[in-house]
Image (cartoon, rainbow, N blue to C red):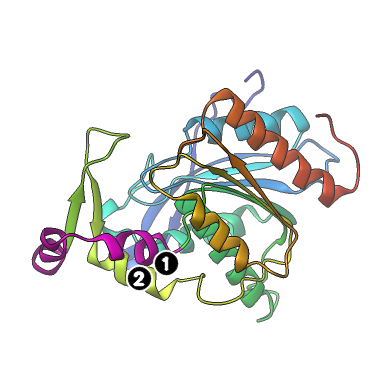
Amino acid sequence: MSDQLSNAQPQFLTVGEGEAAREIAMLVRPAQAGNGAPALVWLSGYRSDMSGTKAVELDGLAAELGLACIRLDYSGHGLSGGSFGDGTISRWLEEALAVIRHVAPDRIVLVGSSMGGWIALRLAQELARQGGEGPKLAGPKLAGMVLIAPAPDFTSELIEPNLKAKERKSLAERGYFEERSQYSPEPNIYTRALIEDGRDNRVLDGIIETGCPVHILQGMKDADVPHAHAMKLVEHLPADDVVLTFIRDGDHRLSRPGDIALLLSAVKGIIRSSTNRQMPD
């Protein structure tokens, strides 16, 4: 990246109060003067952060097009404070919402990967709900979403039904269980709090109204989130303009050059439709 934010230092925002307070790291790229296009907001997956390949490439696209870009690390992830073991969907949603409100763009495009897709859908619901409760709570207008291997409700849809007896026992006795990760030498840790909170944040139990165009990218060789899950999500978005792109040989990460090209093209398409003007391919 050749501009002034290529080596930018993160800013920190305190979210929560008292013992629940944690410092959330964020990287905020301002839009070029006069650029009225929506800001891009990156939402990482479980145990991922804002320095990953897709996040950096998205920021590079923002630099190229003169767009604002907001990236953050959830608590317990990356450069942010707080314990990973305290993390829940509600907690990470609160942090993303706080960062977006702090930066206060007029319009946003949410780009969520894996669990970040779930956070994006919940953000859409919260922005719509709270926007009707007065100007103090009103947030930016949602101009579009790009969801990469989205994993809404993964705790209740993908984890709970497949728990082994020893994992259920560990949850009951220790409050968490561990699972080997193919992406890290450290195991994935799933807590009872995460699973219980996940039930309270379900989105696949009714119609989801985002009020914006949605583009879903899904690998058909995804070992973590089966492509049938993306198809199920589409069924819950009947009121939205939804495009579902299957990548036949794509895995869960979708970080290969060809996958990145599809991601950036999808984001440009959403921006183009929201601004009603041509942008470079």
Horizontal and vertical percent position of residue 43: 52, 48
Q: Foreground: 138 or 49?
A: 49
Look at the image and tell me in which quarter the C terminus lies. top right
Task: Report the residue at 78% width, 35% height from top.
Answer: 32
In the picture provided, is 27 more to the left or to the right than 269? left
* Tag 1–tag 2 contact (CB < 8 Å): yes
Task: Report the residue at 40% width, 41% height from top.
Answer: 48
The chief SS type of the magenta part is: helix
In the picture provided, is 112 more to the left or to the right than 168? right
Sequence-first tag of 1 and 2: 1
Horizontal and vertical percent position of residue 237: 65, 66
Task: Report the residue at 22% width, 42% height from top.
Answer: 180
Look at the image and tell me in which quarter the N terminus lies. top right
Amino acid type indicated by mark 2: Asp
In the picture provided, is 22 more to the left or to the right than 62? left
Residue 9 position (above or below residue 273) = above
Most extreme residue toward the right, as rendered?
A: 277
Residue 81 falls inside the magenta stretch: no
Horizontal and vertical percent position of residue 14: 43, 56
Identify the residue position indicated by label 1 in the image: 90
Q: Foreground: 256 or 14?
A: 256
Residue 49 placement: quadrant: top left
Q: Which region shows up in magenta?
A: 153-175
Residue 160 falls inside the magenta stretch: yes
In the rendering, which numbered label is found on residue 197? 2
Badge 1 marks a residue whose secondary structure is helix
**Is the residue marked by circle 1 packed among few (<14), some (14-19), or many (20+) residues within 10 Å?**
some
